Image (cartoon, rainbow, N blue to C red):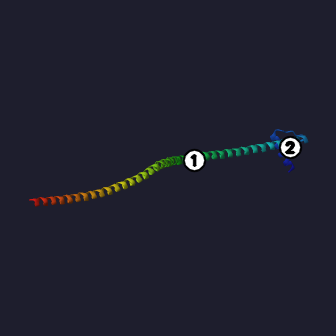
């Protein structure tokens, strides 16, 4: 096993470019250097793995952000379409409400004028009916007087006529 470890370390050292051996076995300085280089190589490998994972995570985050941006854009488009649908209805409703308010304001004085005219009409109608009754009474009285006058004249004429007959 120990020889396997030496071979593995030798291979690692060979890979790192250091091949100093004395009598077929490395010296203590060489062992320390090999270990330092091995540790450095291990550190570099770890750094490369960390960098690779960091790049993978960065790529996944970018992909996710791209999907989020796409979803945000789609939601924004949907909101704009929704606002476009709501806006004309709101405008029409607002316009109609303003028109109703305007007509209502115009109706109020017209209603008051109508009520005033109705009162005036009722008063005028009552005055008209009173005058008609008065006229009917006057006409009736006139008819009575005319009738009485005719009777009295007829009576007088008859008397005169009798007087003339008696004179004859």
Horizontal side, residue 89 vs residue 50: left or right:
left
Q: Which mark is residue 35?
A: 2
Quarter of the figure with the C terminus: bottom left
x, y percent for residue 162: 13, 61
Q: Name, please, the residue furthest toward the left.
A: 168
First in sequence: mark 1 or mark 2? 2
4 or 61, which lies in front?
61
120 or 8, which lies in front?
120
**Foreground: disc 1 or disc 2:** 1
Whether the residues at callouts 1 and 2 have beta carbons within 8 Å, the answer is no
When the figure is inspected, residue 126 is found, relative to residue 50, above or below; the finding is below
Q: Name, please, the residue furthest toward the front.
A: 167
Horizontal side, residue 55 vs residue 37: left or right:
left
The kind of secondary structure element at disc 2 is: helix
x, y percent for residue 144: 25, 59
Query: Residue at image x 10%, y 59%?
Result: 167
Q: Which mark is residue 59?
A: none
Horizontal side, residue 112 vs residue 11: left or right:
left
Res 69 visible: yes
Quadrant of res 10: top right
x, y percent for residue 29: 90, 40
28 or 142, which lies in front?
142
Number of marks in picture: 2
The kind of secondary structure element at disc 1 is: helix
Quadrant of res 46: top right
x, y percent for residue 131: 33, 55
Mark 2 Cα within 10 Å, few/some/many (few <14, many 20+)?
Answer: some
118 or 45, which lies in front?
118
Query: Residue at image x 66%, y 47%?
Result: 64
Query: Residue at image x 73%, y 44%?
Result: 54
How far apart are the two marked residues, 1 and 2, measured between alpha carbons? Answer: 64 Å
Q: Which mark is residue 79?
A: 1
């Amino acid at each position: 096993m120990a020889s396997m470890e030496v071979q593995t370390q030798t291979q690692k050292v060979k890979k790192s470019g250091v091949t100093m051996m004395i009598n077929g076995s490395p010296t203590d300085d060489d062992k320390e250097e090999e270990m330092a280089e091995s540790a450095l190589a291990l550190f570099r490998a770890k750094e490369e793995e960390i960098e690779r994972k960091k790049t993978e995570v960065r790529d996944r985050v970018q992909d996710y952000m791209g999907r989020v941006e796409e979803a945000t854009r789609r939601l924004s488009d949907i909101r704009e379409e929704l606002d476009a649908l709501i806006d004309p209805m709101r405008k029409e409703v607002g316009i109609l409400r303003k028109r109703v308010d305007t007509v209502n304001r115009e109706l109020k004085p017209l209603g008051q004028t109508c009520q005033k005219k109705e009162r005036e009409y009722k008063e005028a109608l009552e005055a008209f009916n009173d005058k008609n009754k008065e006229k009917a009474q006057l006409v009736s009285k006139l008819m009575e007087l005319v009738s009485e006058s005719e009777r009295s004249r007829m009576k007088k004429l008859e008397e005169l006529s009798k007087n003339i007959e008696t004179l004859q």
